[in-house]
Image (cartoon, grey):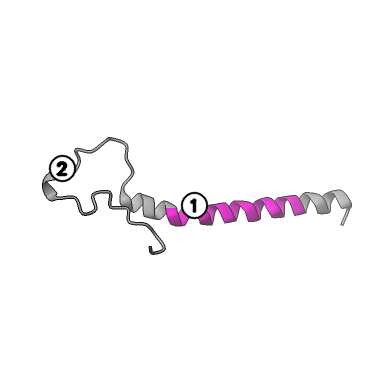
Amino acid sequence: MGLFSDLDLSGDMPLRARPLFGSGPAHVHSTKFKRMMRIVVPIVSVAFAVGLFFLGRMFYLMLTGQ
């Protein structure tokens, strides 16, 4: 398996069994959105952790008088 799993839910399903485009459930995210979120979420999580670390460091330095 590669770095990312296959987001095509139809897979090897025959064409006659696939739902028509747009007739699927409402409010389901597109494949493009899912791929984008797989990249954005780790970046935002790391940025949040780094920001929290530096905020804590700033308070520590202020409380210790350094």
Quarter of the figure with the C terminus? bottom right
- For badge 2, the amino acid type reads Leu
Q: Are marks 2 and 1 in contact (CB under 8 Å)?
A: no
Magenta stretch: residue 44 in it? yes
Q: Residue at the location (15% across, 44% down)?
A: 17
Q: Residue at the location (15% across, 42% down)?
A: 20
Measured as percent of width and height from the top left, residue 50 is found at 64, 56
- For badge 1, the amino acid type reads Val
Which of disc 1 and disc 2 is earlier in sequence?
2
Label 2 and label 1: CA atoms lie apart by 31 Å
Foreground pick, 32 / 17:
17
Q: Residue at the location (26% across, 36% down)?
A: 25
The secondary structure that dominates the magenta segment is helix
Give the quarter of the image for residue 18.
top left
Q: Is residue 62 left or right of residue 11?
A: right
Quarter of the figure with the N terminus? bottom left
Q: Residue furthest left?
A: 16
Measured as percent of width and height from the top left, residue 51 is found at 65, 53
Q: Residue furthest bottom?
A: 2
Foreground pick, 48 / 58:
48
Mark 2: few, some, or many residues within 10 Å (few <14, many ≥20)?
few
Q: Residue at the location (53% across, 53% down)?
A: 44
Q: Secondary structure at mark 1?
A: helix
Q: Secondary structure at mark 2?
A: loop
Foreground pick, 28 / 19:
19
Where is 36 relative to 1, above or below? Answer: above
Measured as percent of width and height from the top left, residue 14 is found at 14, 50
The magenta span reads 38-57
**Residue that carries the numbered disc 1 in the rendered image:** 41
**Residue that carries the numbered disc 2 in the rendered image:** 20
